[in-house]
Amino acid sequence: VLMTGLVLWLAWRLSQRLVAPLAHLSATAHAVADGQPEVRADEGLPGEFATVAAEFNRMLDKRDRALAQLAASERRFRDMLDTVELFAVAVDAEGRITYCNGFFLRRTGWALDELTGEDFGERCVPVERRPDREAWRDALREDRLPAHSEAAILTREGERRWVRWSSTMLRDE
């Protein structure tokens, strides 16, 4: 009985040496998954757990560097679109405006908040071309837009401006 008790106590003590570090690693992973990217695993954990924690932290650091590079690239791309003297308009699959650059806004008289989320066809396409809107949306959804086209758009004041469009499909895949 004494021997069984000793074995059980020893097994319990050993399990505690495994459970606590595993719980810490698990909690760290959950914290990162829940939006706390600054959290790091404790590299002072016992034995091999310290190695796992160090590798986990290296993985997080690598991810953080990649995210910073992506953010910088997106910033450069947006800065380029915001300063180039060409119309840049992005729409979602339903034709709702998600982005317009400053040149487009200055030349058409629209304000960004007047267009963001609005249907491009309703706001910017002349009335006689609006019946073509469904065909345009279908082409947009099915990636069948012509690479180059010319079409009139409406300014905020209702004036027509002829635009030569170059269409590029950008997907969130």
Image (cartoon, grey):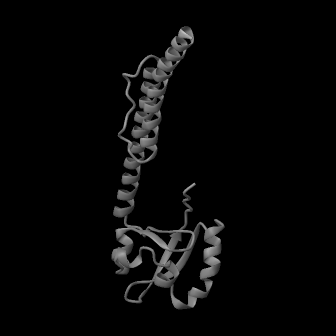
Work out whether 40 lies above or below 142.
above
* Quadrant (top left/top right/bottom left/bottom right) for the N terminus: top right
Give the image location of residue 45, x and y in percent.
40, 22
Above/below status of 173 relative to 68: below
Res. 22 visible in picture? yes
Can residue 145 be seen by looking at this rendering?
no
34 with respect to 140 (left or right): left
Q: On the rendered structure, is 48 left or right of 94?
A: left
Determine the residue positioned at 36% across, 70% down.
103
Q: Position of residue 62 (x, y in %)?
A: 43, 34
Residue at the limit of the structure toward the front, as seen here = 1
Query: In the rendered view of the protein, which quadrant contains the C terminus?
Result: bottom right
Q: Residue at x 36, y 22 (%)?
A: 44
Residue 145 screen position, x and y as percent: 62, 69
- From the top left corner, tell me how far across and down residue 26 is, in percent: 47, 35
In the rendered picture of this protein, how many numbered marks are placed on residues? 0
The foreground one among 145 and 72 is 72
State the residue in front, 110 or 104.
Answer: 110
In the image, is residue 152 above or below residue 80? below
* Residue 150, quarter of the rendered image: bottom right
At 55% from the left and 8% from the top, the residue drawn is: 3
Q: Residue at the top extreme?
A: 3
